Image (cartoon, rainbow, N blue to C red):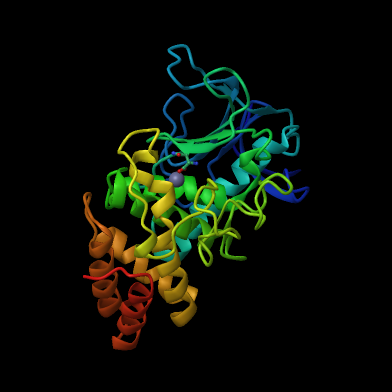
Amino acid sequence: PFNGPAVGTATDLLGQNRTINSYEIGGTYLMIDASRPMFNSSLQFDPADPRGVIWTLDAEDQTPIENDSFSVAQILGNSPNDWDSPIAVSAHYNAGQAYEYFRSTFGRNSINGRGGTIVSIINVTDEDSTSLENAFWSGSAMFYGNGGDVFQPLARALDVAGHEMSHGVVQTTANLEYLSQSGALNESFADIFGAMIDRDNWQIGEDIVSTNFFPSGALRDLSNPHNGTNNPNQHFWQPEHMDEYVDLPETEEGDNGGVHINSGIPNRAYYLFATAVGKDVAEQVYYNALDNYLTRFAQFSDLRISVLASAGELYNNSVVQAAASAFDQVGITE
Ligand code: ASN
Ligand code: ZN
């Protein structure tokens, strides 16, 4: 029996036909993509000890939250084109796209920079077994719920996959503490790279929000953190300037000090910077700042200092000035 990489096509949650890389083990196909440069072909692929692959798994409507018996199942097909879950197709394809973004844009080999396996887990539920209106990075894998009233299945959106994978990149670079300003920077980098991977606009989640729940048609918008409302009590509203910074308790109920709230301020700074110098320049400056300048307890002022230093290292004074202007406009000073 043949064991090795295979390639086929299948339809995702957007109704698009996608190339799906899989791994055949004796006539059965697993949703394991061993086609990337991260896969060191001199290594014998061992399913019991896989490395350097993009691997999509099925939680089969279990919750990983405080669940000692949480387990995942392989996603199986009888041919390289036989994938009956469009959720799985979306998650697997989007993980490959996000991997390729970091590799081709920054030369980063996988989440950990060392060709480590990328795991996505679909059909994840909430603690009470209801559908999970979220996706998250667990510290070692990407988890996707199937939404409900607010969201469609979260695996559908490339910017969501990009956001969650970027949390893994942040963890293995600056490792920004997920609390208050450093946490908002962690969130902001996840949104920034999510938007750069998706590339089409400045919105996050426009492909998964349910109709009319969000006035702007998206979960967040880097160009307009207020997101179509002037009401700070709407949960999707974010500040866009330090004058609007929201002090929240450093608890789970307080969103760890407002990490998903105050990220609006550095998000808008990035939007202003990228509008001035172009996305191709802006993303290089920010990735280098994340990888080589920022550290775990960085605050917004440290982002400014790091981005300006990174811009000076990679480009020239006009890029440094554009960054300074962007931070000035959102009230982030040294
Ligand atoms: N979707 C959220 C995020 O990635 C989940 C969370 O709150 N950790 O930020
Ligand atoms: Zn996040």
Q: Nearer the viewer, residue 252 or 292?
A: 252
Q: Residue at x 39, y 39 (%)?
A: 255
Quarter of the picture holding the N terminus:
top right
Where is residue 238 drawn, in percent x and y?
47, 55
| Image vertical order of residue 267 relative to residue 311, above or below | above
Residue 16 shows up from this direction? yes
Q: Is residue 65 above or below residue 105?
A: above
Q: Quadrant of the C terminus?
A: bottom left
Q: Locate residue 125, reporting x and y percent.
A: 58, 24
Between 283 and 181, the one lying in front of the other is: 181
Give the percent coordinates (x, y) of residue 120.
Answer: 53, 36
Looking at the picture, tell me which residue is in the foreground, 207 or 41.
Answer: 207
Q: Can you say whether 27 is above or below 97 in the image?
A: above
The residue under the point 31% across, 84% down is 321
Residue 43 point in image, percent of width and height = 41, 39
Q: Nearer the viewer, residue 269 or 243?
A: 243
In the image, taking residue 89 as reference, residue 121 lies left or right, namely: left
Q: Is residue 226 left or right of residue 281?
A: right
Residue ranking furthest to the top: 69
Rendered residue at 29%/51% (across/down): 182
The residue positioned farthest toward the right in the image shown: 15
Rendered residue at 34%/63% (across/down): 242
